[in-house]
Amino acid sequence: MASQGWKDAIDARLRAEHGGLTGVGRRAIALVNPTPYPVAMSSLGYQTVYRLLNALPDTVAERAFLPEGADAPLCTYESRRPVSDLAVLAFSVAYELELGGLFECLRRAGVPPLAAERGPRHPWVVVGGPLSYADPRPLAPFADVVVLGEAEAQLAPLVDQLFAGGERAATLRALAERGF
């Protein structure tokens, strides 16, 4: 059954992994890489952010990757939930050619690609990675928040602000005041 094939592929990959993380937390984040699993998991930066997010109090990060099958939805690997069910979609984008994968991931998640078209019912779209500090301009129309530079020191205040419960415009102002 084609619709089951993507679940079987995820199960097989998870069985082959070593050092996978699982957690429980009210602050759920989909850490999305807009490339297929084998490419994404070769990124030490992606793996580092995954580990650091899961180390934050009351926070769980679940991984998602550009689906390889035409019928595969964009779901997290850890719980198989649609990424749109999580409050934050955090993308790691390495270079401009990955923007097509970003758009495809947003399409499969049912999230408008342009930040200006999103409302309070949509998850936050946060974009970081090597492209964000090389040239963040291509990301700006598509991200609610762009993380510039190394993410390690910025993750805790970013996550705290995104989950503080304020209105979208107030949260964006508070993040802008913090340099996001």
Image (cartoon, grey):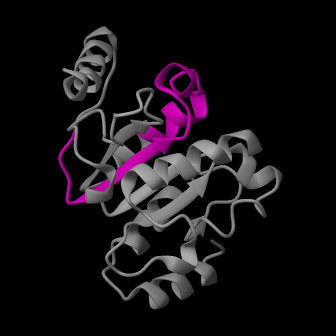
At horizontal 52% and vertical 61% (from top left) the residue drawn is 126
- Quadrant in which residue 120 is drawn: bottom left
Residue 62 counted in the magenta span: no
**Residue 35 included in the magenta stretch of the image:** yes
Q: Is residue 152 visible?
A: no
Question: Picture quarter containing residue 85?
Answer: bottom left
Query: Residue 144, how many percent across, how many down?
Result: 55, 71
Identify the residue at image location x=52%, y=85%.
Answer: 174
Q: Residue furthest right?
A: 135
Residue 94, image x and y in percent?
69, 40
Image check: 38 left or right of 164? right
Q: Nearer the viewer, residue 9 or 55?
A: 9
Residue ID at (20%, 38%): 79
Q: Is residue 86 visible?
A: yes
Instruction: Identify the residue at horizontal 55%, vertical 87% (top origin).
Output: 173
Where 77 sits versus 152, above or below?
Answer: above
Q: Which residues are the magenta region?
A: 23-50
28 with respect to 47 (left or right):
left
